[in-house]
Image (cartoon, helix red, strand yellow):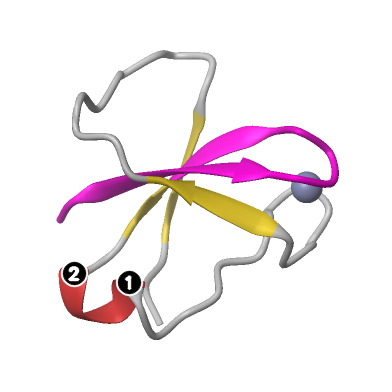
Amino acid sequence: MPHYDHLCNKCNKSFVIEMKISEVDKKKVPCPSCKSKDVTRQVTNNSFTSESVNRYVWDK
Ligand SMILES: [Zn+2]
């Protein structure tokens, strides 16, 4: 599954969500930290695999 980098505009945390391409445009991903939906998806393709970034699986 592809990974998508996100940045929360509220708490400024970045996180990574795994989800299907077909779900990307349908779902608003909330920030796992503060639950805000004010989240920006970062459309980069250089999937940096930093260990400091939390990964989540969006499995609904
Ligand atoms: Zn947040």
Q: Is residue 1 above or below residue 45?
A: below
Q: Residue at 65% across / 65% down in the picture?
A: 30
Q: Disc 1 marks which amino acid?
A: Val
Task: Label 1: state its secondary structure.
Answer: helix
Mark 2 is surrounded, within 10 Å at the Cα level, by few (under 14), some (14 to 19) or many (20 or more) other residues, namely: few
* Residue numbers of the magenta segment: 1-16
**Residue that badge 1 annotates:** 24
Location of residue 29 with respect to 49 vertically, above or below? below
- The dot on residue 59 is none
What is the number of the mark on residue 21? 2
Residue type indicated by callout 2: Ile
Check if mark 2's residue and mark 1's residue have beta carbons within 8 Å. Answer: yes
Q: CA distance from mark 2 to mark 1?
A: 5 Å
Is 14 colored magenta in this rendering? yes
Within 8 Å: ligand 1 and the Cβ of disc 2?
A: no
Relative to 9, is 5 on the left or the right? left
Classed neighbour count for the residue bearing mark 1: other residues with Cα under 10 Å, few (<14), some (14–19), many (≥20): some
On whether residue 5 falls in the magenta region, the answer is: yes
Specify the quadrant that holds the N terminus. bottom left
Q: Which residue lies at the image location 57% right of the left edge and 51% below the top edge?
A: 40
